[in-house]
C-alpha cells in the first residue's frame, strides 16, 4: 500500500482573547490507500482541528504555523487558495457530524451533488444529473429519481447522512475525512452508515481518516488508530494491538472508564483533574498532572515515542527501556491491589414506588380553515411500567420513540391524555396546586444539556436553594444554606462553588450541580433524561459513579432515559424498550440484555458497536440489516398492527392485523410479539 | 396554501373593520371641519345647509354606519375640499408615490445588499468598518434634514439636480411615470435617495448579521469542503438562506415608505399621496383622511400577504409543508 496522505509535524495556532492557543502541536500521521485511520480523543483534544487543518478550513482566527500535509507527495499547505479549492472535494472529501445542518436547507439534494460534479469538471448538465442520481443509488437511497428534487428536510437523519456521503464522494476523492460521521445518528442507523462507508471504501480503494470519540466505532472500522490528548498524538498503533495493550496511562484510564455489562457493580475508572490549557509550551508530559503513575521525570521532560514494536508506540516515559524496573514495580503494586468487591445486589424489594398504567400522551394535529383536529401524534401510547424503591429502570429506544415525552409526562410537564400514575400508592395524575407541588418535590428531573438547564444569571447556591424554598424545605435561610453546602459535598463539588456562576464550570461539573439541585428536594425518584450523552467518556464515568453512590446512600430510584446501551448495561436493574410510543419488551436487565426476545430489542442490541466480543449476541446478518434500513415510521401515522412490522425481519401477515398482546416470558420479563411463546 | 390565504384574508377584514372604527373616531375627535370649510361671512342658514349636505348633523354612530354602508359599495365619501370621490383623488396621486417608493427601495437593495455582504464577509477590514459607521448615520439622521441638505448641495450649490416636482412624465399604460425620461429620473434621484437612506442602513445591518451567522453554519463549512468557489458559496449558499429575513424587511419597509413618504414628498413638493394627506389634514378633509388611512392599512395587509407567499417561494420548508397548520 502506498502513502496517500502524510501529515508531518503539523502545528496549528488560534488567536483567542487569552492569547495564542496551540490546538495542534506536532501531529505526524500517514494514510495509506484503502486504509481506515482513526483519530480518537475527547473533546478539545484536537482531532477535529487536525481534519480542518488538513483541509485548510480553519476558523477565521486560526492558522497553520508550520508542518507539511503531503498529498501524493506534494505539500498542499503551500498551494495558493484557488489551487487548494481544486483539492477540496475532488481529491480530499469530507463529511461532517450533523447531517441535519451540513446540507443547505434551501437547495435540493440533487443540486448539492451536481454542483460538486460541475465544479470539478466531471460532468455537466443532464449528464451531471444522471451521475448524481447514480450516486444517490450507490449510497443506498431508495427511489433516487424522486429524492434528487427533494430538500434535505424531507429526508430522515440517516438519509441525510447518505446524501452527505454522496456529495463528498461524487468527485471520487482519494481521501475521505469523516468527522464524527455517526455521532448524531441512532445505533441502528449508525450500523448502516458504517457498513456503507466500509463498502464504498473497499469498492473505491480510498483512504479514510475517521475522527470520532467513540472507541467502539473505531474498534469496528479502523485499521490503525491514533489517540489524541491535549493537541498531540499520545499513542498510535494497529487496531488489535491498540485495544489489547493500552501502553499509555491515558488509554488505560479511557478504556476502563467505558461503561458496559462487564463492569457492573464496580466503580468506573475516572481521570482526576482537567485537560491543561493549551497556551504555550509544555515542559513535561501533558498528561502528567492527571496521571496516577507520574514521577519527577514526567514533569521535566516531554516523553519520546516508545513501544513494543515500531508500529505500536506511545509517548510515555514508563515505556522507556531504561525505566523497565519502574514499570515492573508499578505492575506488581497494581496486582497487589484488592479489587473492590462487585456490589450489585439489588436492594431488598421494598415494593413499587412508581406504578404507571397505560400512560398516553397524544398531541393533536390541526389542519384546515378552522384548525380542525385531523389526527394525533401518539408520542406515548399506552405505556405501563413500574419502578421499585432504590432501583434503576432504564427506558431505552431510538430518537423519536417517545421516551423523553414519557419521562416528562410522569412529572406532568406535558399534558397527559390518559392513564394512571401511582406514586407511593397514590394517584398523581390530575393533582393541582399545592398537592401537585408536593408530588413534584418527590420526583425530580435531570436534563441532558447541562448548559441549557441551569440559569446563567443565578449563582450555584441560589440555583440549588431555589427549589428548596419553593417546596418549603428547610426551616429558614440558614438551614437551607447548610443544606446547600451538604449537597455540594455529596455531588463532589467544593463548598465555595455556591458563589460561582454556571459558566465557570465544565460540562461534568454542571451536571453535578443539576444533580444537587434535583437532590435538594429530597426526592424518592429522579428522572434522568440522557444525563451523560453530552459528556466525554471519562466525565461520563464520574457522573455514573456519582449516581450509583447516591443510590446506595440515599436509596433513591432512577428512571434512566437513554439510547446508550453501554450505560444501561452498566447501571440498570430493569430495562424497558420503547418503540413508537409503546413498550415492546421489559424485564430485568439480565433478561432483556442477555436474552432479548423481541426482534427490535435484538436488533438494537446487536447494532451497538462494541470494543470486544463481550456480547453473547450474534451480530446482525445482512438480511436483518436490510429490513432495519427501512425508515422509522412517523408516530402520527404508525403502521397498523405491530408498529415494528415494517422493519422486522420476522414479520408475517398476522403482524399487520393487531397490536400484539403482552406475552409473559417470566414473572418479570414481558414481550409484545406474536412470535414469542411463553416458556 | 389556499386555506392559508383565505384565513389571512378573513383576518384582514377584521383588521380593516377595527381600523375604520379607530380612524373614524380619531378624526372626529380632532375637530370639526365646518369652521375651516365655511367662510366666516356665511349666514347661519347657509351654515346649517352645508352641515346637512355633508352629513355632519347626524350623530357619530349614524355617520359611521352610513360610511360603512357606502364603503361596501366602494364609496369612501367625497372630499369636502375638492368635491370629488376621495378614492379617486387618492388613486390619482398614488402612482407618483408608488414610483418614488419603489425607486427608493430599489436603491436601498442595490446599495445595501452588496455593502452588507461585504461587511459581513470581511468584518475587520477598513471599508467594512466605514460601511458600518456610515450605516449608523443612515439610522440617526432625520429624513427632513437629509432632504434639505441634499437640496442645498445638489440643487442650490452645485445646481446638478432639480429640487422639486416630478419633471416631465411619460405615460405608461395610461399612468404617468417619471423614470422613463432623463428629466424625470433627475427629479426622482434626490427624493428617492432621501427616502432610501434609512433602508440602506437597515439592509446593510441585516445582511451583515445574516452573512456572519451563515458563515458559521455547517452547510457553509461543508460547501467550502466541496471545493466550491467563494462566488458560489456566497452567491448561492449564503445568499439564498439570508434572503428570507431580508425580503420580509424590504417588503414591510416598502409599506412604511409609502405610508410615511409624507415628509419627503412635502420637502421635494412631490405630487404624491403624502402631500395630499398633509393638505387634507390642513383643511380637516375627513373623507380623504379616512380613505387614505384605510387604503394604507389595506396596502400593509396586502404586502404582508405577499411576504408570506414570497417566503414560501424562498424556503422549501414553508412551501412544501402545509402552511395551514401553523
Image: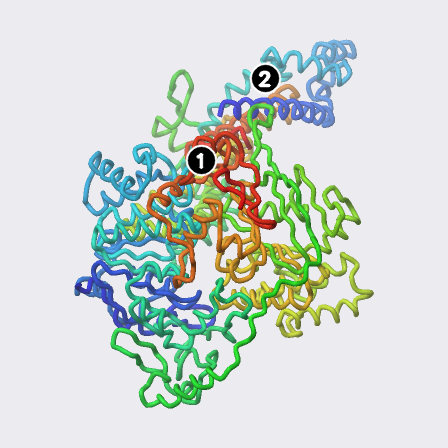
Q: Earlier in the sequence, mark 2 or mark 1?
A: 2
Residue corresponding to mark 2: B86
Vertical arrangement, residue B145 with respect to residue A352, above or below:
above
Q: Position of residue A419 (x, y in %)?
A: 67, 39
Q: Which residue is mark 1?
A: B104
Q: Is residue A633 left or right of residue B29?
A: left
Q: Position of residue B187 (x, y in %)?
A: 41, 32
Q: Residue A629 is drawn in which quadrant? A: top left
A638 left or right of A160 in image: right
User: Image quadrant for the C terminus of chain B?
Assistant: top right
Is disc 2 in contact with disc 1, using a CB cutoff of under 8 Å? no
- Kindly give the residue lying farthest to the front in the view shown: A679
Choose between A463 and A645: the one closer to the eye.
Answer: A645
Relative to A41, say whether B47 is above or below. above
Report helix, strand or loop for mark 1.
helix
Q: Position of residue A199 (x, y in %)?
A: 27, 50
**Mark 2 packing: few (<14 Cα in 10 Å), some, or many (20+)?**
many
Pointer 2 chain: B
Q: Tell which of A176 and B228 is nearer to you.
A: A176
Residues at marks 2 and 1, CA–CA distance in whole angstroms: 26 Å
Amino acid at each position: 500500500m502506498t502513502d496517500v496522505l502524510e501529515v508531518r509535524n503539523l502545528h496549528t495556532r488560534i488567536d483567542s482573547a487569552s492569547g495564542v492557543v496551540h490546538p495542534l502541536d506536532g501531529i505526524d500521521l500517514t494514510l495509506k490507500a484503502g486504509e481506515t485511520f482513526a483519530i480518537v480523543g475527547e473533546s478539545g483534544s484536537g482531532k477535529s482541528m487536525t481534519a480542518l487543518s488538513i483541509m485548510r478550513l480553519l476558523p477565521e482566527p486560526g492558522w497553520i504555523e508550520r508542518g507539511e500535509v503531503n498529498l501524493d507527495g506534494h505539500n498542499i499547505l503551500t498551494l495558493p487558495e484557488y489551487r487548494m479549492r481544486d483539492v477540496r472535494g475532488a481529491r480530499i472529501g469530507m463529511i461532517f457530524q450533523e447531517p441535519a445542518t451540513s446540507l443547505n436547507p434551501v437547495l435540493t439534494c440533487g443540486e448539492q451533488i451536481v454542483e460538486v460534479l460541475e465544479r470539478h469538471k466531471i460532468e455537466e448538465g443532464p449528464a451531471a444529473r444522471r451521475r448524481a442520481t447514480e450516486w444517490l443509488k450507490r449510497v443506498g437511497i431508495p427511489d433516487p429519481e424522486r429524492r434528487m428534487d427533494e430538500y434535505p428536510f424531507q429526508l430522515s437523519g440517516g438519509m441525510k447522512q447518505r446524501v452527505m456521503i454522496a456529495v463528498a464522494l461524487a468527485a471520487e476523492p482519494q481521501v475521505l475525512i469523516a468527522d464524527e460521521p455517526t455521532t448524531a445518528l441512532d445505533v441502528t442507523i449508525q450500523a448502516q452508515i458504517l457498513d456503507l462507508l466500509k463498502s464504498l471504501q473497499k469498492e473505491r480503494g480510498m483512504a479514510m481518516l475517521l475522527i470520532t470519540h467513540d472507541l467502539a466505532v473505531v474498534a469496528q472500522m479502523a485499521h490503525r488508530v491514533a489517540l489524541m490528548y491535549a493537541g498531540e498524538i499520545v499513542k498510535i498503533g494497529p487496531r488489535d494491538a491498540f485495544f489489547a495493550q493500552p501502553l499509555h496511562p491515558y488509554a488505560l484510564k479511557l478504556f476502563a472508564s467505558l461503561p458496559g455489562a462487564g463492569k457492573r457493580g464496580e466503580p468506573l475508572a475516572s481521570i482526576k483533574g482537567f485537560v491543561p490549557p493549551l497556551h504555550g509550551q509544555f515542559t513535561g508530559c501533558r498528561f502528567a498532572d492527571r496521571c496516577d503513575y507520574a514521577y519527577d521525570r514526567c514533569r521535566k521532560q516531554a516523553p519520546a515515542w516508545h513501544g513494543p514494536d515500531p508500529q505500536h508506540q506511545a509517548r510515555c516515559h514508563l515505556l522507556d527501556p531504561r525505566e523497565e524496573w519502574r514499570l515492573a514495580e508499578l505492575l506488581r503494586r497494581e496486582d497487589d491491589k484488592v479489587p473492590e468487591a462487585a456490589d450489585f445486589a439489588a436492594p431488598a424489594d421494598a415494593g413499587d414506588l412508581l406504578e404507571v398504567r397505560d400512560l398516553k400522551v397524544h398531541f393533536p394535529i390541526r389542519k384546515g380553515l378552522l384548525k380542525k383536529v385531523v389526527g394525533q401524534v401518539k408520542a406515548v401510547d399506552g405505556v405501563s411500567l413500574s419502578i421499585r424503591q432504590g432501583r434503576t429502570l432504564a427506558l431505552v429506544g431510538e430518537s423519536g420513540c417517545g421516551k423523553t415525552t414519557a419521562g416528562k409526562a410522569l412529572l406532568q410537564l406535558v399534558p397527559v391524555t390518559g392513564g394512571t400514575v401511582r406514586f407511593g400508592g397514590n394517584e398523581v395524575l390530575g393533582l393541582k396546586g399545592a398537592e401537585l407541588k408536593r408530588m413534584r418535590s418527590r420526583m425530580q428531573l435531570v436534563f441532558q444539556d447541562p448548559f441549557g438547564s441551569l440559569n446563567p444569571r443565578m449563582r450555584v447556591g441560589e440555583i440549588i436553594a431555589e427549589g428548596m424554598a419553593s417546596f418549603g424545605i428547610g426551616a429558614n435561610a440558614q438551614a437551607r444554606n447548610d443544606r446547600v453546602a451538604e449537597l455540594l459535598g455529596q455531588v463532589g463539588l467544593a463548598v465555595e462553588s455556591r458563589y460561582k456562576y454556571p459558566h465557570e464550570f465544565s460540562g461534568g461539573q454542571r451536571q453535578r450541580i443539576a444533580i444537587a439541585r434535583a437532590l435538594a428536594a429530597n426526592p424518592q425518584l429522579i428522572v434522568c433524561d440522557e444525563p451523560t450523552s453530552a459528556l466525554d467518556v471519562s466525565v461520563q464515568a464520574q457522573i455514573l459513579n456519582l449516581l450509583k453512590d447516591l443510590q446506595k446512600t440515599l436509596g433513591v430510584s432512577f428512571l434512566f432515559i437513554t439510547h446508550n446501551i453501554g450505560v444501561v448495561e452498566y447501571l440498570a436493574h430493569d430495562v424497558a424498550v420503547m418503540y413508537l410510543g409503546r413498550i415492546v419488551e421489559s424485564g430485568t436487565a439480565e433478561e432483556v440484555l442477555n436474552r432479548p426476545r423481541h426482534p427490535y430489542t435484538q436488533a438494537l442490541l446487536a447494532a451497538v458497536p462494541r470494543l470486544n466480543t463481550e456480547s453473547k449476541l450474534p451480530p446482525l446478518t445482512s438480511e436483518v440489516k436490510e429490513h432495519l434500513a427501512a425508515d422509522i415510521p412517523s408516530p402520527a401515522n404508525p403502521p397498523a398492527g405491530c408498529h415494528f412490522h415494517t422493519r422486522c425481519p420476522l414479520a408475517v401477515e398476522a403482524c399487520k392485523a393487531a397490536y400484539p398482546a403482552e406475552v409473559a416470558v417470566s414473572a418479570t420479563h414481558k414481550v409484545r410479539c406474536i412470535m414469542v411463546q411463553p416458556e | 396554501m389556499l386555506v392559508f390565504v383565505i384565513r389571512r384574508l378573513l383576518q384582514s377584514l377584521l383588521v380593516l373593520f377595527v381600523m375604520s372604527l379607530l380612524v373614524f373616531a380619531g378624526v372626529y375627535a380632532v375637530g370639526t371641519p365646518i369652521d375651516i370649510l365655511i367662510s366666516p361671512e356665511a349666514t347661519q342658514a347657509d351654515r346649517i345647509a352645508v352641515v346637512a349636505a355633508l352629513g355632519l348633523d347626524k350623530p357619530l354612530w349614524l355617520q359611521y354606519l352610513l360610511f360603512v354602508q357606502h364603503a361596501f359599495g366602494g364609496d369612501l365619501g367625497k372630499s369636502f375640499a375638492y368635491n370629488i370621490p376621495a378614492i379617486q383623488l387618492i388613486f390619482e396621486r398614488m402612482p407618483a408615490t408608488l414610483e418614488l417608493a419603489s425607486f427608493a427601495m430599489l436603491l436601498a437593495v442595490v446599495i445595501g445588499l452588496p455593502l452588507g455582504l461585504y461587511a459581513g464577509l470581511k468584518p475587520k477590514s477598513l471599508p467594512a468598518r466605514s460601511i458600518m459607521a456610515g450605516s449608523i448615520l443612515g439610522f440617526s439622521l432625520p429624513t427632513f434634514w437629509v432632504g434639505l441638505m441634499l437640496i442645498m448641495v445638489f440643487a442650490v450649490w452645485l445646481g446638478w439636480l432639480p429640487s422639486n416636482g416630478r419633471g416631465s412624465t411619460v405615460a405608461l399604460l395610461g399612468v404617468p411615470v417619471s423614470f422613463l425620461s432623463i428629466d424625470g429620473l433627475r427629479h426622482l434621484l434626490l427624493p428617492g435617495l432621501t427616502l432610501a437612506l434609512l433602508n440602506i442602513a437597515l439592509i446593510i445591518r441585516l445582511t451583515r448579521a445574516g452573512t456572519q451567522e451563515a458563515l458559521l453554519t455547517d452547510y457553509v463549512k461543508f460547501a467550502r469542503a466541496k471545493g466550491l468557489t467563494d462566488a458560489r458559496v456566497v452567491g448561492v449558499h449564503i445568499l439564498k438562506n439570508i434572503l428570507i429575513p431580508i425580503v420580509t424587511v424590504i417588503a414591510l419597509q416598502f409599506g412604511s415608505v409609502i405610508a410615511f413618504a409624507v415628509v419627503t414628498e412635502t420637502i421635494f413638493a412631490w405630487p404624491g399621496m403624502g402631500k395630499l394627506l398633509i393638505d387634507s389634514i390642513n383643511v380637516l378633509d375627513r373623507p380623504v383622511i379616512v380613505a387614505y388611512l384605510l387604503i394604507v392599512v389595506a396596502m400593509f395587509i396586502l404586502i404582508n400577504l405577499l411576504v408570506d407567499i414570497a417566503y414560501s417561494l424562498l424556503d422549501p420548508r414553508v412551501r412544501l409543508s402545509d402552511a395551514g397548520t401553523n
